[in-house]
Image (cartoon, rainbow, N blue to C red):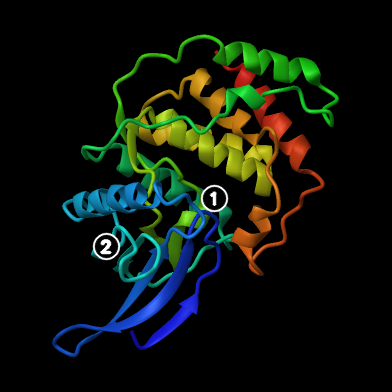
């Protein structure tokens, strides 16, 4: 290893850009992910899971990192770690052409969902034991209605390959073009609505409910499918008990997060989701 630099983001793991030299003396730029924040028993599972997904993606047309090596038990890196190829590009949070930016994001997600990859069943990130009407809300009935929706069983549908953390921080751009999708730790098999709802929540917390609505319309138009309301509501409820300072850590100096209007934006998107048939 000839150089190391910390990468912006890295909420669940430590991410570093590294330069390495192989056995033949050839230099390579890579990204090292180390599971320093997770319990010891989770790190190996995350490394092996992402490694399997990255190997499977190599046989597809989805632009993603290439697996280089793994250190499952942290024998070399002190923590469970995965080394992958470095991809040129940057996270685009303030696009010059928002309409085209949004269309490319939706189109890429449809491509992912049309990809056939054997992946583990998606697990819900919603902690139902902590779902209570937020004290800050002036619309408690809105949240009660959302809780009622997910008390029913999720709709039955054919599972598809999903990213399970598809959002603007995991997309790389060059010259206005979406070139790569990264962070495949949670790659799973499940309803496409899981991905759609997750990025709608991300658009709501960072931008606007209107952008979240436009994305839903675009995705359904491009894919020719309808996102079930159940998954949309379930995904938006992940906002509770609250999203915090990690958003600014992800954004770094690239974007100033408007925390003041966040509650209102999420509630507007949730109201729209509940009004859907």
Front tag of 1 and 2: 2
Please give the residue where the numbered disc 2 appears in the rendered image: 70
Quadrant assignment, res 66: bottom left
- Please say whether residue 156 is visible from this viewpoint: yes
Q: Secondary structure at mark 2?
A: strand
**Mark sitting on residue 99:** 1
Which of the two labelled residues, at mark 1 and mark 2, occupies the earlier sequence position? 2
Quadrant assignment, res 222: top left
Q: Position of residue 47 (x, y in %)?
A: 33, 54
Q: Is residue 129 above or below residue 98?
A: above
Q: Is residue 158 above or below residue 58?
A: above
- In this rendered view, identify the residue nearer to me: 41 or 247: 41
Counting labels gives: 2
Quadrant into which the C terminus falls? top right
Query: Which residue occupies 72% across, 22% down?
Result: 132
- In this rendered view, identify the residue nearer to me: 241 or 114: 241
Q: Secondary structure at mark 1?
A: helix
Q: Is residue 65 above or below residue 50?
A: below
- In this rendered view, identify the residue nearer to me: 179 or 220: 179
Q: Residues within 10 Å of mark 2 (few under 14, many from 20)?
A: many
Query: Which residue occupies 52% across, 53% down?
Result: 168
Q: Position of residue 193 (x, y in %)?
A: 44, 29
Query: Which residue, as the protein is rendered here, is positioned at the far left?
Result: 24
Q: Position of residue 225 (x, y in %)?
A: 38, 25
């Amino acid at each position: 290893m000839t150089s190391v630099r910390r990468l912006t983001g890295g909420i669940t793991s430590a991410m570093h850009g590294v330069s390495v030299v192989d056995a033949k003396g050839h230099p390579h730029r890579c990204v090292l992910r180390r599971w320093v924040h997770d319990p010891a028993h989770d790190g190996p599972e995350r490394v092996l899971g992402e490694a399997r997904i990255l190997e499977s993606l190599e046989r597809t047309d989805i632009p993603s990192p290439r697996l280089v090596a793994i250190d499952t038990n942290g024998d070399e890196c002190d923590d469970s770690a995965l080394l992958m190829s470095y991809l040129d590009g940057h996270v685009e949070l303030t696009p010059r052409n928002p309409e085209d930016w949004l269309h490319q994001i939706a189109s890429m997600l449809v491509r992912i969902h049309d990809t056939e990859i054997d992946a583990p069943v998606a697990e819900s990130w919603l902690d139902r034991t902590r779902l209570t009407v937020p004290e800050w809300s002036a619309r408690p009935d809105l949240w009660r209605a959302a809780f009622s929706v997910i008390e029913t069983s999720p709709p039955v549908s054919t599972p598809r390959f999903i990213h399970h953390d598809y959002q603007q921080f995991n997309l790389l751009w060059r010259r206005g073009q979406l070139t790569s999708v990264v962070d495949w730790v949670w790659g799973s098999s499940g309803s496409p609505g899981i991905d759609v709802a997750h990025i709608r929540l991300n658009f709501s917390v960072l931008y606007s409910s209107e952008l979240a609505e436009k994305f839903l319309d675009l995705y359904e138009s491009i894919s020719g499918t309808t996102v079930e309301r159940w998954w949309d509501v379930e995904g938006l409820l992940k906002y509770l008990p609250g999203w915090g300072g990690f958003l600014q850590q992800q954004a770094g100096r690239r974007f100033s997060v408007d925390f003041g209007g966040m509650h209102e934006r999420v509630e507007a998107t949730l109201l729209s989701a509940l009004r859907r048939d």
